[in-house]
Image (cartoon, rainbow, N blue to C red):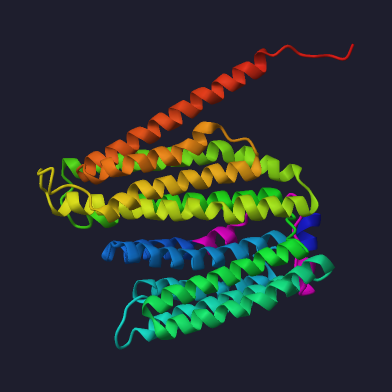
Amino acid sequence: MANDEDEVMGRIFRSRPVVTKETHRTTLFEIFFDLVFVFGFIRVTEFMSARPAPVTMVQGFLVLLLLWNSWLVYSWLGNQARIDVGPIRAGVTVGMAAVFLAALVIPDVWESGPGALGPRLILVLAYIVVRVIHLVLYHWAAVGSPRLLRTIRVYALTTPLSWVPLVLGAVFGGTAQILLWTAALVIDMGGGVVASMLSGWPVRSPGHFAERHSLVVIIALGESLISVGAGVGAGMTHGPVLVAALLTLTVTVCLYWLYSRNAVAAGKALTRKSGLGRGQVAANAYTVAHFPLIAGTIYLALGVEQVLAHLAHHQSHDTVEGRLGWTPAVALFGGTALYLAGRATFLSLSVRSVAPGQFLAPAVVLLLLPAGRFLPGLVALGLLTAFLVVLVSYEAVARCGRGSSARSEPEVTAG
């Protein structure tokens, strides 16, 4: 232990990056870094809940993708070199401040009229600062790895191209903003794919990489619980509100179990990979497939907040008046379906063994959406909860059955 500490301190003194080892795990500074993304997720939910509509959900999706990209690039950086020591820590702290500013103005970046340009430019400029700092730090941390340096330089050629439509979208606003920001995200993500295909993104510590993504899923799931308080506000916590709150907790616990029970196996599968194969699995199963998990959870939080707000502030027992609107219903059921689809994709790309029920679950939730639309909000939330409880129970029984079958197979010995 003392030798490891001396090595770290010596590298800091020489102002060189501390390259991570195979056994590296998530640091406290990285968890602290994630706090600004908690704030960002909350701001996205606040924005969509203030004006629940299909276009608002699309706008929220784009902002979520910007936040996700901001988080992703630093998770890859933290896998290459420790971000809690030396100059990298200073640079990441500045990036954290930029993300915080971007999150602060999220509710105003889609406004029109005088004064609306300011928040949009703040978000875009803050995002550019986040990406510039990342590229500089990643390039510095990659010294000594010609392949990674080549990957970063390819990525650095395409990333600035995405900033052009970002700035133009901020200037024009309206529908042009949606189209231009969509183009910017396609260019940015496409550049990462091209860089990966040409030379690959190495993963030095699979345990760290899997752990970072599991933690951000837990952070997003926490947003569904935060939405309970946001929906209730200062309203009276009468019986239906308390029931809805407990149902939300049950939904959150179910989604956590559905993810965590398979995350360990996925992490082991990533560890068994090596070289460029490990980087490809990490990019596909974690970088790509985890975004539906995050986005689905945030949409679920939006639906929960709408249900709780209605129960808390419109204490009506009229079933017609209490029906969900299409937007809250899509958020509630569609968000859950998106989460389950992301989980199935994650497992298919990592452990490469997905039960048919895991692929069918998102479709079943979508089939429940029309029924949920014509039910009172509390009943719709209860319907979703019942489905998830059944799904968790079914997978637990199926897992026990597979385990029993494996133990009962006769041992074959070489004779």
Asked if residue 263 shows in the view, the reply is yes
Q: Is residue 53 above or below residue 268?
A: below
Q: Residue at x 30, y 39 (%)?
A: 247
Specify the farthest residue to the right: 415
Q: Residue at x 23, y 39 (%)?
A: 379
Asked if residue 81 shows in the view, the reply is no
Name the residue nearer the viewer: 248 or 364.
Answer: 364
Q: Is residue 85 above or below residue 398?
A: below
Query: From the viewer's perspective, is 230 left or right of 362?
Result: left
Name the residue nearer the viewer: 258 or 85.
Answer: 258
Q: Which residues are magenta?
A: 9-34
Tally of numbered tags:
0
Query: From the viewer's perspective, is 249 left or right of 267?
Result: left
Q: Residue at x 43, y 86 (%)?
A: 171
Name the residue nearer the viewer: 178 or 401.
Answer: 178
Name the residue nearer the viewer: 386 or 144.
Answer: 386
18 in magenta: yes
Q: Quadrant of residue 345?
A: top right
Q: Quadrant of residue 268?
A: top right
Q: Is residue 73 above or below residue 322?
A: below
Residue 390 image position (x, y, % from top left): 39, 29
Q: Residue at x 25, y 46 (%)?
A: 373
Residue 210 image position (x, y, % from top left): 63, 49
380 in magenta: no
Q: Quadrant of residue 110?
A: bottom left
